[in-house]
Image: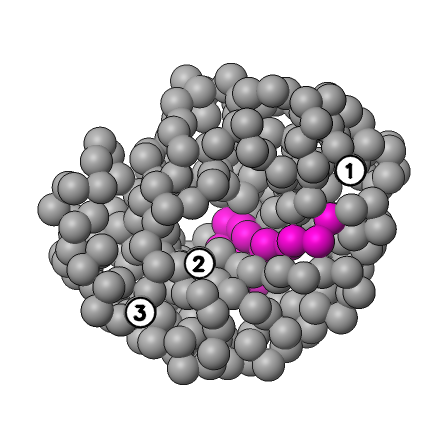
């Protein structure tokens, strides 16, 4: 599939839930959020059909996101079914790592290739503040479990304010270098203001090279994170929603006034 700017669209990010077991300061308001009704959330079978159709149309890279994907029951058998779809060459997952110690090996055995883990600081006090209660030790055990399970690469997503030379980012970089992890630095984004930059050591935010679509937990295909455009797979049909998303994918993201990171998938 190619969009109107001759970019090959080959990457689908799939949000399986808007639920999360953390409340990070840059992702969710302190007072919490209104969760989607369970009836609005796509079933695993619906998601699998979207992925099958997408692969038949040219998608070969799939990443599972949330919210926090590991809080959704039945994720491991779902991953096994995704991994069995012919044509997928790259299957990844993004997680905050809190539950990863338990799930890393089962996920790898189910066919997951790679994993990205959010880690903005290695200071346990600061981590608890940023995440509003998270336990850094659980994340560190999850990272080790991912490496032990053979998931590769294990990438660390570190959100920064201004520069990857900030003290917390520098400490995360050194932590990664010492353990054979790949660090990626993501400048804090603002959907409504359209504030984003290219991810350091990654491709996110590089509009000229953007090759992705997003499937939200409630069944909307989004061609761009920084756009209000979305196409409903339940109302329009999967193939039609994908075709419209690709056809209307903007050259560059501007702003998103209707969505949130927790339910789009970042």
Residue 159 horizontal side relative to residue 7, left or right? left
Whether residue 8 is situated above or below residue 228 in the rendered picture: below
Spot occupied by residue 25 in the image (x, y as percentages of width and height): 30, 40
Extent of the magenta region: 59-73
Horizontal side of residue 260 vs 180, given as left or right: right
Q: Which residue is mark 1?
A: 1
Q: Earlier in the sequence, mark 3 or mark 2?
A: 2
Q: Position of residue 57 (x, y in %)?
A: 83, 45
Give 153 or 78, whichever is nearer the viewer.
153
Question: What residue appears at the point 50 percent right and 19 percent down from the top-left corner?
Answer: 255
Q: Earlier in the sequence, mark 1 or mark 3?
A: 1
Residue found 12% across the figure and 46% down from its top: 167
Q: Nearer the viewer, residue 99 or 168?
A: 168
Residue 30 appears anywhere in the view: no
Crowding around mark 1 (Cα neighbors within 10 Å: few <14, some 14 to 19, many 20+) is some
Does residue 63 belong to the magenta stretch? Answer: yes
Residue that label 3 marks:
180
The colouring scheme, among rainbow, by chain, secondary structure or one colour, is: one colour
Residue to which mark 2 is pinned = 116
Distance from disc 1 to disc 2, alpha carbons, whole Å, reads 26 Å
Q: Is residue 263 left or right of 183 when viewed as pictured? A: right
Give whichever of 48, 203 is nearer the camera.
203
| Position in image of residue 81 (x %, y %) | 74, 69
Category of crowding for the residue at label 2, using alpha-carbon neighbours closer than 10 angstroms: few (below 14), some (14–19), many (at least 20)? many
Given this view, does label 1 or label 2 mark the residue nearer the observer?
Answer: 1
| Labels 1 and 2: the sequence-earlier one | 1
Q: Quadrant of residue 211?
A: top right
Q: CA distance from mark 3 to mark 2?
A: 14 Å
**Residue 70, labelled with which disc?**
none
Q: Position of residue 75 (x, y in %)?
A: 62, 67
Report helix, strand or loop for mark 1: loop
């Amino acid at each position: 599939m190619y969009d109107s700017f001759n970019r090959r669209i080959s990457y689908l990010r799939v949000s399986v839930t808007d639920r999360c077991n953390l409340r990070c300061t840059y992702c969710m308001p302190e007072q919490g959020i209104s969760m989607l009704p369970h009836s609005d959330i796509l079933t695993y079978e619906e998601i699998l059909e979207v992925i099958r159709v997408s692969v038949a149309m040219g998608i070969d890279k799939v990443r599972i996101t949330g919210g926090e994907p590991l809080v959704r029951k039945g994720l491991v058998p779902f991953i096994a079914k995704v991994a069995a779809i012919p044509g997928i060459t790259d299957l990844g997952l993004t997680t905050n790592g809190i539950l990863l110690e338990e799930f890393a090996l089962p996920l790898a055995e189910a066919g997951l290739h790679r994993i990205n883990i959010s880690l903005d600081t290695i200071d346990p006090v600061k981590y608890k503040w940023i995440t509003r209660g998270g336990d850094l030790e659980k994340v560190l055990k999850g990272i080790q479990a991912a490496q032990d399970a053979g998931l590769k690469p294990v990438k660390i997503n570190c959100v920064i304010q201004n520069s990857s030379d900030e003290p917390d980012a520098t400490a995360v970089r050194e932590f990664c270098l010492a353990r054979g992890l790949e660090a990626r630095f993501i400048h804090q984004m603002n959907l409504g203001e359209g504030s984003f930059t290219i991810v350091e050591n990654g491709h996110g935010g590089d509009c000229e090279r953007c090759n992705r679509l997003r499937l939200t937990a409630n069944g909307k295909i989004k061609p761009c994170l920084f756009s209000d455009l979305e196409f409903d797979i339940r109302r329009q049909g999967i193939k039609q929603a994908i075709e419209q998303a690709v056809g209307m994918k903007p050259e560059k993201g501007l702003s998103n006034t209707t969505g949130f990171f927790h339910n789009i998938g970042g």
